[in-house]
Image: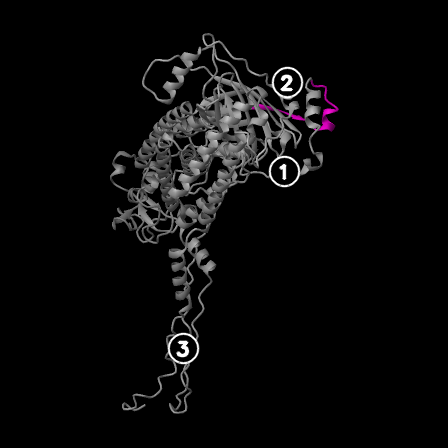
Amino acid sequence: MERGDENGPPPIDVRFQQQRSSIPSFLFIIFMLFLLTNHNGDEYLSRSRFQDALQVMNDQLSNYTVWLNGGSSNFSMPESPTALFSLGQSFVPYGPKLDRTHGSYFPNTTGFIRGSLDFYNITPHSLETTNASWKSQAQSFMSEANLTELSDKLGSWNWSATRNLAWSVVDRGPVFVEGVSERIAMIHGKIDLTDPTSAYDMQLEFYGVHFVSNGSIYGFAVPNGRGFDIRYIPVIVPESVRNETARVIKPELASRIKKVQEMIDAGVVEQESQGGNPETNCEFVLHAQIEPSPIFEELMQDLEDELQKPTGKWTTERPPMRLNGMLVSQHCGLLYRLHDADGLRSQSFFRKIINYASFSSIFYLVMLVLLSRQIDRAHTPAALTRLSLWGFLVQAIVDSVAFAGHITFAILTNGRSSMSLVAPAFLAFVLFALEAQHVILINQIQAPEDAATQQTRHTPSPAPSITTPATDPAQSPSPTASPRPAGPPFFQLVIRHLRADPQARIWLGMFLFITFIIRVIVSPSLTLLFLGCMYSMFWLPQIIRSAKQGRPSALSAEYLIGTSICRLYFALYFLTCPKNVLDVRPRRWAYYLCAFVLFQVAVVLLQQRLGPAFFLPKRFATTETYNYHPPLPLSVSDPEAPEQSLGDCSICMEAIHAEDPKPLQHVAAGLLQKVGGRKNYSLAPCHHLFHTECLEKWLAIKNICPQCRRPLPPL
């Protein structure tokens, strides 16, 4: 091609760059605009539902007010089931009014109630085979039930396996209403029915009234999220107080309307969530009776005022609140007898949470200090090779679950005590971060040593050059854009990265394992199994590694004993204390678990004194270790030379002599001289020769060969 021919076609091997498609950029811009301009549709739907509910509540209040005044309205009160009260008296006798100077009932029931349940099937077919004293009352009560819909209403919940009840109550306290002489308080809350074999609890919403003068509670318990019209509560109270109860409902309706209106005006709209509650249509009626207290009424009121607004005033010791009750469903043929129920006031419960958070923070802080001191002591590669990463990995997983549990607990409490739970959650997270970092460091040191094979890097061979004969530019075809070479798939790139990066493998493994754990701990039975497995593996991997390597661990006695005691505090508190904050029932096997953990600590300490394999038989106690001092042939050219050099040390670059004159000054001639000469050198598995002293100093920093970078076994 001539120089002047500058507009000629380019060479055939020139590749034109293709313009990048604008479609991905356009889609990305559309997506960002959608995120910026999109509003949460669920929030708008919830706001619309709240506005509709507000309109319905206003209509209910209007109709109910007209009905109270004796006018004609769309509301009518159904008739009271007479058989319900006779059945309730068989289980929960109506509480008498007490003399104020001899005893009193608790004026406020706000708090948490835990009790045991006895199940009874009161369907007509089952009642025929029972001889209970309340059989006739139950038959009369079930005579009005529609048995054709019974199976559909029951749902999938195992009602016969329910044995425990957890009841959270909010008591608004008595309010002054014109024409009402009784001290009646509106109460509401949540009832959780527990089945040990199920991963979920049956949640019921409770709406009722509390008669302070005689300690009686009446209410409805409906499935979670179904809602309930509180205007029908007077149907299930005794006839003597029915009219007064109906008058107390009116200010409660007005209060709810005001609350909903304030939420809408403030833009605070709560979205309802079912939370995995089993489907059921069973509605229950609850009758409960609080046991009287020997404290007279004035002193009980002083105790209540001090609990609500503490001033430091001396009051008597608060007696335990106990109650019994009955939970019955006419449409489902179910009856539960509530007995041995203990109540804990919210303020007392929050104080209990604060005490737990304080002690937990102290123990986590102690574990954090012990771990920091252990890391400072054993930070060299020589010490890290004697540690088991699985022991620290198990502790990191336990601490991550503890962090998530404390944060969740703090969110659920939603009170003054929730801030106190942030302290142990934060310390557990810091402890998890240090342990995870230490696990990664141990893996980096031990991976070259423990790896059976090393990955070989495949370098692509250069493509052979192809020479094409020269052609006339005029006859050469027009240049075309060569296709872009297709890269490897995304998943293949991810797999390559995981194979090449050990830290990525560890983090991915921890993420998958923690995700699996979070799914497992939803089930109460699997949670205890997980806890037992994790605690039993704290020091067991360290015992196995020390015995296999033939070297004791680098764990200090301070770290072993201190960490074990702090860990066992949480296990003993939740599994042996009947009054723990989570209301976990005591387990006798917790003592065996603690004994097993302490036994592991004793074995690790004995390995440091008696040998790593002291508990194994002699034929298994010997471990094959690499011999750094094999017999090497002397110089053939001059076997009687005074200084026989075996080569140069790759570390200090000095000659390696078969015999070191310094240590041999104190060693006798003969066999001992030969032994002393052999230990002066060290031959690595890669056949590189070093001074023993130099190699020891090198292995204290890195456990790879300084010349070929191959992993080296311990010296």
What's the residue type where badge 2 is placed? Ser
Query: Viewer-proximal residue, 550 or 628?
Result: 550
- 1 or 2: tag closer to the N-terminus: 2
Q: Position of residue 100 (x, y in %)?
A: 46, 10
Say which element carries label 2. helix
Identify whether 353 is placed above or below 643. above
Q: Position of residue 201 (x, y in %)?
A: 55, 34
User: How far is mark 1 from mark 2, CA to CA?
Assistant: 30 Å
Q: Any magenta on residue 121? A: yes
Query: Viewer-proximal residue, 646 or 468?
Result: 468
- 2 or 3: tag closer to the N-terminus: 2
Report crowding for label 3: few under 14, some 14 to 19, many 20 or more residues within 10 A (C-alpha). Answer: few
Say which element carries label 3. loop
What's the residue type where badge 3 is placed? Ser
What's the residue type where badge 1 is placed? Ser
Left or right: residue 387 compared with residue 105: left
User: How far is mark 3 from mark 1, CA to CA?
Assistant: 73 Å
Magenta part of the chain: 116-132
Query: Viewer-proximal residue, 314 or 658?
Result: 314
The residue to which callout 3 is attached is 465
Say which element carries label 1. loop
The residue to which callout 2 is attached is 90
- Image quarter where the C terminus lies is top left
Figure label count: 3
